[in-house]
Image (cartoon, coloured by chain):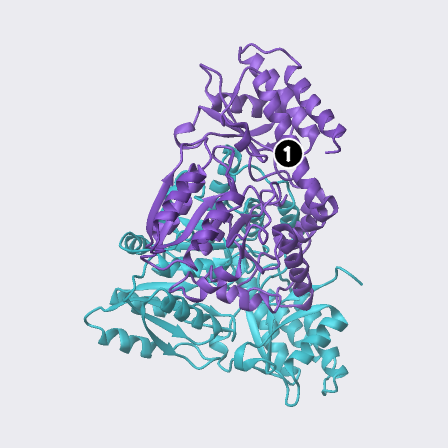
Chain colours: A cyan, B purple
Amino acid sequence: MRDKEFLMIPGPTPTPQSVLLALAKHPIGHRTPEFSQIFADVLEGLRWLFQTKQDVITFASSGSGAMEAAIYNTINPGDKVLCVVGGKFGERWRDIALMKGADVDTIDVEWGKALEISILEEILNEDTAKKIKAVCVTHNETSTGVTNPLKDISEIVNKHGALLIVDAVTSLGAINMPFDEWNIDIAVSGSQKGFMLPPGLGFIALSEKAWKAVDRCNMPSYYFNLKSARKNLLKNTTPYTPAVNLFVALEAALKMMQEEGLENIFKRHARLAACVQSAVPSLGMKLYVEDPCVRSNSISAVCAPEGMNADDFRKAMKKRFDISLAGGQEHLKGKIFRIGHLGFCSDRDILATVSCIEVCLAELGYPVEFGKGSAEAAKVILEYAKEGK
Amino acid sequence: MRDKEFLMIPGPTPTPQSVLLALAKHPIGHRTPEFSQIFADVLEGLRWLFQTKQDVITFASSGSGAMEAAIYNTINPGDKVLCVVGGKFGERWRDIALMKGADVDTIDVEWGKALEISILEEILNEDTAKKIKAVCVTHNETSTGVTNPLKDISEIVNKHGALLIVDAVTSLGAINMPFDEWNIDIAVSGSQKGFMLPPGLGFIALSEKAWKAVDRCNMPSYYFNLKSARKNLLKNTTPYTPAVNLFVALEAALKMMQEEGLENIFKRHARLAACVQSAVPSLGMKLYVEDPCVRSNSISAVCAPEGMNADDFRKAMKKRFDISLAGGQEHLKGKIFRIGHLGFCSDRDILATVSCIEVCLAELGYPVEFGKGSAEAAKVILEYAKEGK
């Protein structure tokens, strides 16, 4: 059967029909009052989503483009940058900063663990000369399913005075991240995650302090140039041709999100994560992240049972049920699989996925008690309903 | 009446229904055999369109992103770069090269004129020390409607040995530009032009010589990194999340283009341009480009009649007929309007546009003989039909 594929990966995520139909509308000219109106609506929606009064810049790019924008516009060659590296996306901050010629220090966090606040605190306390210009962290590390304690991180970084640069690619629109309230300096995201959109748009929000760093920056990228982007934003337009259709689809997606409400979106993601994370152990598998307190609400990493190659299991799920799961990255390849539960994802999707996992485990010869996983998930759904969540 | 807008601008250009429907298909995972197959098909299609055996890299970006990729991956700070500047897009080459820290020389060409080959020849002949590392030109200058003599330019640049870097944004898929045969080193384009797609994809093709320059380059962009893009291309994938839906739509668009055939596409654009450029003088207006030999086949710039603000005329065309025309840029604002006739554009569209121009001219009080413009266009269509074009 065709066209029944189901994405339980951390991006691209499921996309609502209304968003796809908006995407298919014929493009309009981007230097028109009509487009400027869409741009203005979208900008308001993005401010709402980032929980900020600041300008949010949209690029025709993936989220990695927005990550480049963050570093290339605020860091000068030779500047000291501290990167928290606890997974593949933490490594990306380090790699971008190195390519820009920064003097990069890292805090290497074991994969599957969150940053220990005391380590960051110690390093920043020791930096009395304030050499560290920026601290780059990953809010939700997609490669491991860990959510870092961003609020606490922000307090410490703010006390020091460095810029706090945050990868919010798989947290924004899934996990609470009040940009202004938490005094974040830069946050970046991408469209194919919590946004419920196909890939092709990168987002970046900056605090007043971050904009001042932009002013001091030499040789930013040409395309990812925040100064010219902001200058054009004030006229409700972009310096270069925007991805018009994705903008129109973004307007539709933001409208859906606003109808659901931020609080409800965060509650739903918490519930979906709780369902998955309760069900997995009952299926005889371990969650990759041991500490329940730092497990992500948008993605769960699952260790393949002894003797199983996680990628074989993923293939079985794809073949039997047309469900896409994500694999492990780098040294975790074949060892874990990752279930994305962010964006346009419902209780029903989780129950379906858990039941399908049971069937595939049994089919591959692993001991499974049918219905046990979905019973755990069902219990969570009803518990949350009782608490009005 | 809604949804009857018609784009006669040089991008976004009209998009076929089949391409829009492909765009609206639910995204698939980009790290899957299904996406790799699409990637491979698209790559073959791009090679066909660029008329090259080389790899063609696709970025989630606008064409300007691909322009940045061209410079940032091949030019080192301090390298001498010669930019031909005869309009807004020639200026863009200069600006990108300056931002990368290159030592930029320009050949300033009067707007509306093509590059005089002898000037380029003289400069390159004088550079016996071979200090000039690259020559950047605009094949089709969208701001003026001039097509530069690229084949001749290429011969001269190749004799010298510098890299020839070409903005083919509004020429590719409209005007013949055989990348390999003409020994072009780098050509960039964007999806919302001859490709008949919405904006959001940038393209870049490189010769062997250009790839060697990439190997020698320090500090390229992180996102627009050609080395990592090529490494991933060999595995039919991209380093960062591609704009999946635009890729799927691109596959559909390339299929349509291949059904029409390259020769027929170029003939159609030549015919559409001839229609417009024959009709305009009969409407009492002058073409901005005086020399018929360098007028573009993809866009025609028209001088507003004495006393008329071109932007008022454009507004009237939009209001009365829902036809979008492009305005003049920089010092030409209000003085010219530009008719895009590239991509998914037919004889019927030209006849409609010409007739609508007649009505709006009359409505704004300019003397017009109804039917004269469309008669000129009709004659061209029939002449071309007689010659089998």
What x and y, as percent, mark residue B317? 57, 23
Q: Residue at x 37, y 45 (%)?
A: B123
What x and y, as percent, mark residue A133? 28, 65
Would residue B143 appear left or right of A183 to someone viewing this image? right
Identified by mark 1, the residue type is Ala
Query: In the figure, residue A279 lies in which quadrant?
Result: bottom right
Front position in the image: A174 or B193: B193
Query: In the figure, residue B120 lies in which quadrant?
Result: top left
Q: Secondary structure at mark 1?
A: helix
Q: Residue at x 53, y 11 (%)?
A: B366
What x and y, as percent, mark residue A300? 57, 74
Front position in the image: B4 or B75: B75
Q: Residue at x 19, y 72 (%)?
A: A128
**Count of marks placed on residues:** 1
Please identify the residue farthest to the left as the structure is shown.
A129
* Crowding near the residue tagged with mark 1, few <14, some 14–19, many ≥20 C-alpha atoms within 10 Å: many
Front position in the image: B129 or B221: B129
Residue A193 visible, this orientation = yes
Residue A116 visible, this orientation = no
What residue is disc 1 on? B270
Quadrant of the image containing the N terminus of chain A: bottom right
Please identify the residue farthest to the right as the structure is shown.
A1
Quadrant of the image containing the C terminus of chain A: bottom right
Up/down of A100 relative to A220, above or below: below
Up/down of A92 relative to B50, above or below: below
Would residue B101 appear left or right of A313 to someone viewing this image? left
Query: In the figure, residue B221 lies in which quadrant?
Result: bottom left
Subunit of label 1: B
What x and y, as percent, mark residue A22? 63, 45
